[in-house]
Image: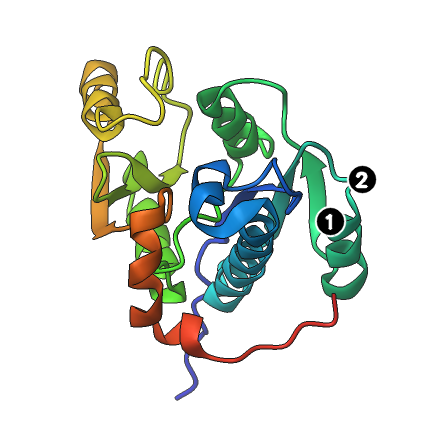
Amino acid sequence: MATDLVHPEAVHIAVLAKAPLPGLAKTRLIPALGARGAARLQRRFTLQTLHTAQQAGLGEVTLWCAPDRGQRFFRALRRHCGIHCRNQPDADLGQRMLQALTAQELVQPCIVIGTDCPALTPAHLQQAAHALRSGQDAVFIAAEDGGYVLVGLRRTIPGLFEGIDWSTARVMAQTRERLRQAGASWQETALLWDVDVPADLARLPELHAWRADRHHPY
């Protein structure tokens, strides 16, 4: 007997990225890599993150660009990959994530990621999407440094990104408190590491995806 195929609910993925420009991208890595080396690393991080997001097969992937989508790198991505690019607002991280999360008015669940977590895999994104499809209001992948590398929402949670000490070890703990205050349900699906400071670079060779030699036309 034939059975109907089950089509899971689409989950939008928004990627926040800085253009790989010397002096703009990965500035905390400049002492180790130089400004141009840090920019090249940002380029590679962005390409890998987009590949990971597309491989997850969850739904549309949108790239939120800083300082703007007119940068040469972003224009090349639109031409070669068909990536839909939007401008990040000139605001703090919380407001930038909120705009990306709510741009679709949450008519479908949305996940936001940055480009600083090369350990993120398609399976991590699929697990996060499953949490949202199962009815959780929010999903997170916490970072070892006290922040998080992924946030996803099913619905708007008032005050979620307000009063957060961004770029500190208190981010995830403060976010949990905002979730409790709002009476929201959430799930944390993994604990990963990101690359923020020179000491983090030593961990990159651990990653199979990082060791793989990929060539891009842009």
Can residue 133 be seen in this snapshot?
Answer: no
The amino acid pointed to by label 1 is Phe
Q: Position of residue 179 (x, y in %)?
A: 24, 23
Closer to the camera in the image, 74 or 58: 74
| Res 86 → quadrant | top right
Residue at the (46%, 54%) spot, across then down: 9
- Few, some or many residues within 10 Å of mark 2 (<14, 14–19, 20+): some
Q: Are marks 2 and 1 in contact (CB under 8 Å)?
A: yes
In the rendered view, how is the structure colored?
A: rainbow
Q: Is residue 88 above or below residue 131?
A: above
SS at mark 2 in the image: loop
Residue at screen point 34% across, 45% down: 132
Q: Which residue is mark 1?
A: 74
Quadrant location of the C terminus in the rendered image: bottom right
Secondary structure state at the residue bearing disc 1: helix
Q: Which residue is mark 2?
A: 70
Q: Position of residue 169 (x, y in %)?
A: 22, 28
Residues at marks 2 and 1, CA–CA distance in whole angstroms = 7 Å
Q: How many marks?
A: 2
